[in-house]
Image (cartoon, rainbow, N blue to C red):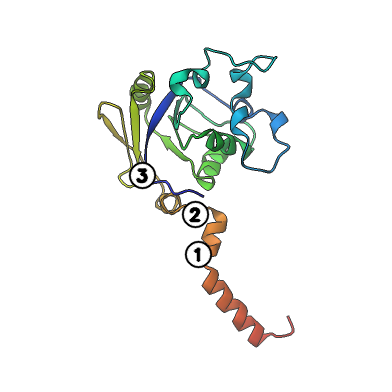
Amino acid sequence: MDKFTTLTGIAAPMPLVNIDTDMIIPKQFLKTIKRSGLGVNLFDEMRYDRDGNEIADFVLNQPAYRQTQILVAGDNFGCGSSREHAPWALLDFGIRCVISTSFADIFFNNCFKNGILPIALPQEAVDILMEDARKGANARMTVDLENQTVSTSDGQEFHFDIDPFRKHCLQNGLDDIGLTIEKASSIQSYEDQMAQARPWI
């Protein structure tokens, strides 16, 4: 998992509320267990028509937002079923941070496990960030995980809260496997002790 320290990038405005995981990545794309290749189908039913052609007015199809790394969204983002493919699709597209007033719990947890930073802020702050995102590619937001701040393109700053353990994992690029590998020497020491004490096991 890639480390998350400071991210400065294009932010796309998506003011819809209750964006569920089926909107993020429709069910027909859940057959794969690979984390790569899902970005092209992110928001598939909003991005493409029935013939597979791009819908020009969808935000991520607009030239200014094709390199989006930050998504500013409406309330209750990631609700619906608990598919881990949703953060996989966001990440594969290039999105490393989602900002909203609230998130569905399972989606929120899955984001951290896949290197995406979900930031919950008050409605007033999200409104200002949404408006800044509407400025397009020339307006870059900055997310500073160390200082726990989000800054608009003109320097207006908002502080966000994050669990210290999750912050540590993101800063060091540690998913569940990485956390286990960190304890490799202790695990091996335990295995060696058990081999001596209980050789029949």
Q: Secondary structure at mark 3?
A: loop
Residue at image location 49% in from the left, 54% down from the top: 174
The reply to whether the C-beta atoms of the residues labelled 2 and 1 are less than 8 Å apart is yes
Residue at image location 55% in from the left, 25% down from the top: 19
Name the residue nearer the viewer: 18 or 25.
25
Disc sitting over residue 174 in the figure:
2
Q: Quadrant of residue 47?
A: top right
Q: Amino acid at mark 1?
A: Glu
Q: Quadrant of residue 71?
A: top left
Q: Amino acid at mark 2?
A: Leu
Name the residue nearer the viewer: 29 or 80.
29
Q: Earlier in the sequence, mark 2 or mark 3?
A: 3
Going by the picture, which residue comes out furthest to the front?
63
Q: Secondary structure at mark 2?
A: loop
Q: Earlier in the sequence, mark 2 or mark 1?
A: 2
Q: Earlier in the sequence, mark 1 or mark 3?
A: 3
Disc sitting over residue 145 in the figure:
3
**Which percent across, then down, holds residue 124?**
34, 24
Q: Whole-Å distance between the Cαs marked 2 and 3? A: 15 Å
**Which percent across, then down, holds residue 66?**
48, 24
85 over 185 or under it: above or below: above
Disc 1 marks which residue? 182
Mark 1 crowdedness (10 Å alpha carbons): few <14, some 14-19, many ≥20: few
Name the residue nearer the viewer: 77 or 133.
133
Q: Amino acid at mark 3?
A: Leu
**Which percent across, then down, holds residue 76?**
51, 28
Task: Assign the C terminus to one quadrant of the image.
Answer: bottom right
**Which percent across, then down, holds residue 41?**
63, 28
The reply to whether the C-beta atoms of the residues labelled 1 and 3 are less than 8 Å apart is no
